[in-house]
């Protein structure tokens, strides 16, 4: 866990790397190579452990690319095969297949809640960005209606999930 002082030092270092307000991972990595840089400690410089972490990220990317066809009452849906395992602790990595998850209504409900929380978080970020960039956003008349449709869609989906996943008495 990083201290607030370390986070602030990294933030300042990143701001100093900006060119016209833009930043690239390559620039960040180049600056972080200097052991005296406040960015240095944010990276794993041991090639063996860094390589292992990178391969884990490649494994995650591979897992996310695999799809499965699921037949519902009305249609055949092509969807990701693996999703975050709702049994995994917040700081733990783990995936479960949709066919397996479909066998456990409680775990399926937990995953749906998790996915909706992610969607709400992303939507909240979009709303915040629209607010921060309000003047700039006014030049595109589609932004507010799209945001409204997304909000209604997420709200409708959340209500449906709550209704369908309520335990029966």
Image (cartoon, rainbow, N blue to C red):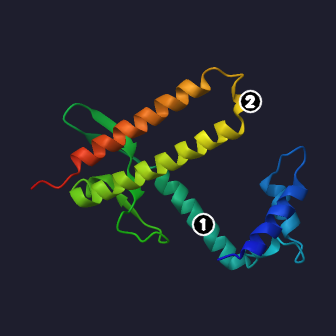
On the image, the x and y values in percent for residue 88 come to 40, 69
Asked whether residue 154 is in view, the answer is yes
Looking at the image, which residue is at 29% across and 54% down? 109
Q: Quadrant of residue 32?
A: bottom right
Q: Is residue 132 shown left or right of residue 71?
A: right
Which quadrant holds the C terminus? bottom left
On the image, the x and y values in percent for residue 38 come to 84, 72
Which mark, by number, is residue 140? none
Circle 2 sits on which residue?
135
Looking at the image, which residue is at 60% across and 66% down? 55
Looking at the image, which residue is at 85% across and 62% down? 12
Which mark, by number, is residue 55? 1
On the image, the x and y values in percent for residue 18 come to 87, 51
Image height check: is 42 above or below 18? below
The local crowd at label 1, few if under 14, some if 14 to 19, many if 20 or more residues have their Cα within 10 Å, is few
Q: Is residue 71 shown left or right of residue 33?
A: left
């Amino acid at each position: 866990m990083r201290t607030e002082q370390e986070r602030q030092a990294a933030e300042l270092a990143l701001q100093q790397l900006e060119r016209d307000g833009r930043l690239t991972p390559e620039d960040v990595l180049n600056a972080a190579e200097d052991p005296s840089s406040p960015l240095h400690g944010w990276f794993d410089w041991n090639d063996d452990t860094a390589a292992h972490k990178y391969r884990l990220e490649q494994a995650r990317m591979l897992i996310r690319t695999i799809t499965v066809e699921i037949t519902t009452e009305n249609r055949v849906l092509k969807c990701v095969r693996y999703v975050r395992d709702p049994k995994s602790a917040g700081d733990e990595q783990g995936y479960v297949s949709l066919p397996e998850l479909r066998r456990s209504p409680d775990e399926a409900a937990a995953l749906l809640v998790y996915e909706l929380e992610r969607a709400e978080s992303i939507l909240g970020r979009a709303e915040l960005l629209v607010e921060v960039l309000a003047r700039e956003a006014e030049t595109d008349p589609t932004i507010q209606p799209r945001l409204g449709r997304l909000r209604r869609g997420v709200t409708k989906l959340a209500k449906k999930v709550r209704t369908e996943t309520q335990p029966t008495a």
